[in-house]
Structures are given as structure tokens and as C-alpha cells.
Amino acid sequence: MKKYAFAALAVLFAVGIALIAVFGVRASAKMQAVRYSVNEPYNYPVKPGDDEWDAMSIEERLEACRVDSETAKNMDTHSLMLTVLDYPFIVDIGFYTHAGEGIEKVRAGFAPLDELLNRSDASDILNEYVREVEKGGNVKDADYAIATHYHIAQSILEYVGNN
């Protein structure tokens, strides 16, 4: 009788382990499926020209425009690129001797730029953006935001190509 009880317990234990293995894998797969890709650029809560922006200190502006690295990692590359180009402080890359130095300085404090520079398809997405802007005609005639985005995208493309 002890033999049968032991055998029955061993079978129940094995079945339990098998169920945990099967449902554990399914639960793990569901957890990974919950992770999603953000396919829209980040909408900064305040922007230059807003009354609220004008009332903020530089530190408050930087904090208000902070995008965490997890959000950046979840973005598709096109949305990530637009998030970078729309970043109110992206123009800071032009304050340095060369764009590469400016990109590194901004990258250090802005997770989306760091994430974009680590994407294998960043060059393709940036090139596509530059071509689309050029199709629209003379960039010099474009509004300030488009012209600025265009030149920043070119600087980032050059940086990616050199690194």
C-alpha cells in the first residue's frame, strides 16, 4: 500500500510540475505580449511659445520634456525620430563646435536620442524623412520647424554614418 501511495504522489508531483511548466510558459508569453510598441511621437506637455513654458525655469522645462528610457524603447523608430526632432532642446546640438559633440551632449540627458542612435534602422528612417522633406520643395522656403527638423535629421544622419 505504501508503494502505491508513493507512486501516486510521484505521478501527482510530475503532473503538477508539467502543468506549472505549460501554464508558466503561457503566462510568460502573455506578459511579453502585453508589451506594446508606441507608434505615435511623444506629445510634449509644454512647448516654446506656451504661456506655461515662458513661466518655467530651464530646469522645469527640462523636467517637463523628459521622456523616460522605457517609453523610448517601446516606440517604433519613426515615432522615436519624430519625438527627437520635436524635442524643444534638440537645437542645443548646434551650440557646440561640431554637431557630433552637440549630439553627444544632448544624448547624455535625453533617452529618446540615445535610443534612436542605438536603433539599427535609424539611418533608413532618417534618410526617408530627409527625402520626404526634399520632395516638398526648397527647404529654405519651408517653415522654421520643418527646416530645423530637416537640418537636425541631416546632422544625426551624418553622426550615425560616422560612428
Image (tube, grey):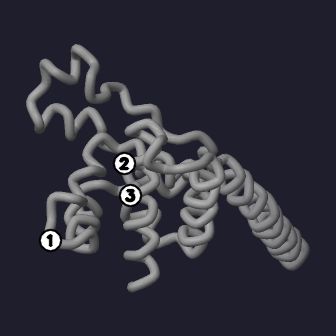
Instruction: Decide: is 56 above or below 27.
Output: above
- Distance (Cα) linking label 2 and label 3: 21 Å
Question: Mark 2 or mark 3, which is nearer to you?
Answer: 3
> Left or right: 123 with respect to 34?
left
Instruction: Decide: is 66 above or below 11.
Output: above
Q: Position of residue 150 (x, y in %)?
A: 46, 54
* Labels 2 and 1: the sequence-earlier one: 2
Instruction: Decide: is 47 above or below 97.
Output: above
- Distance (Cα) linking label 1 and label 3: 15 Å
Q: Is residue 1 visible?
A: no
Disc 2 marks which amino acid? Asp
Q: Secondary structure at mark 2?
A: loop
Question: Mark 2 or mark 1, which is nearer to you?
Answer: 1
Disc 1 target residue: 97
Disc 2 target residue: 68
* Residue 59 in which image quadrant: top left
- Between 30 and 24, the one nearer to me in the picture: 30
